[in-house]
Image (spheres, helix red, strand yellow):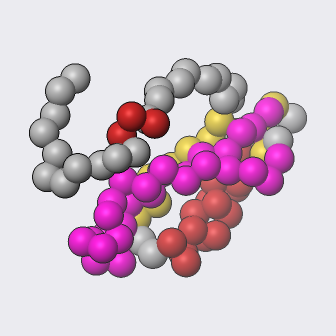
Amino acid sequence: MSRKLKKANDRLDQLRLEDYDEGSCCQMLHLSSYDDEPASFAQMEAFCSEHGYRRSDKTHREIYLSDPRRTETAKLKTVLRFKVETD
């Protein structure tokens, strides 16, 4: 894949892509400030509980889809994900 960059990036040659299997997960798209994420995690945990899953540990992933320098706080998009196991 070739792409022209607006600015040179001397770290681009350090980039690598990897595949890994996270196993069963619960994830949702969080739309709002990063400060509001605990409410979304609570919704995710409630969903899991209702459907026979539980969070396997307290680690999680946050995948930022918006640039906070260019996006209004209320419109920030973040994918939240944590591992689950069955009850």
Q: How many labels does the image show?
A: 0
Indicate the quadrant containing the C terminus: top left, top right, bottom left or bottom right. Answer: top right
Please give left or right for residue 74 compared with residue 51 in the image. left
Residue 9 rendering spot, x and y as whole percentages:
30, 49
Q: Does the magenta stretch include residue 43?
A: no
Please give left or right for residue 10 compared with residue 30 in the image. left
Q: Residue at x 16, y 34 (%)?
A: 3
In the orientation shown, which residue stands out farthest toward the front? Answer: 10
Answer above or below: position of 51 versus 39.
above
Q: Which of 80 and 86 is in front in this view?
A: 80
Q: Which of 18 and 51 is in front in this view?
A: 18
Q: Residue at x 62, y 41 (%)?
A: 26
Q: Residue at x 47, y 27 (%)?
A: 17
Answer above or below: position of 16 versus 49.
above
In the orientation shown, which residue stands out farthest toward the right? Answer: 87
Residue 38 in view here: yes
Range drawn in magenta:
57-85
Answer above or below: position of 23 versus 9.
above
Residue 47 in view here: no
Residue 86 rendering spot, x and y as whole percentages:
81, 31
Q: Does the magenta stretch include residue 69?
A: yes
Q: Quadrant of residue 74?
A: bottom left
Please give left or right for residue 25 compared with residue 29 in the image. right
Q: In which quarter of the image is residue 55?
A: top right
Q: Nearer the viewer, residue 41 or 11?
A: 11
Residue 71 rendering spot, x and y as whole percentages:
27, 71
Q: Which residue is drawn at 14% across and 52% down?
A: 6
Q: Quadrant of residue 37?
A: bottom right
Indicate the quadrant containing the N terminus: top left, top right, bottom left or bottom right. Answer: top left
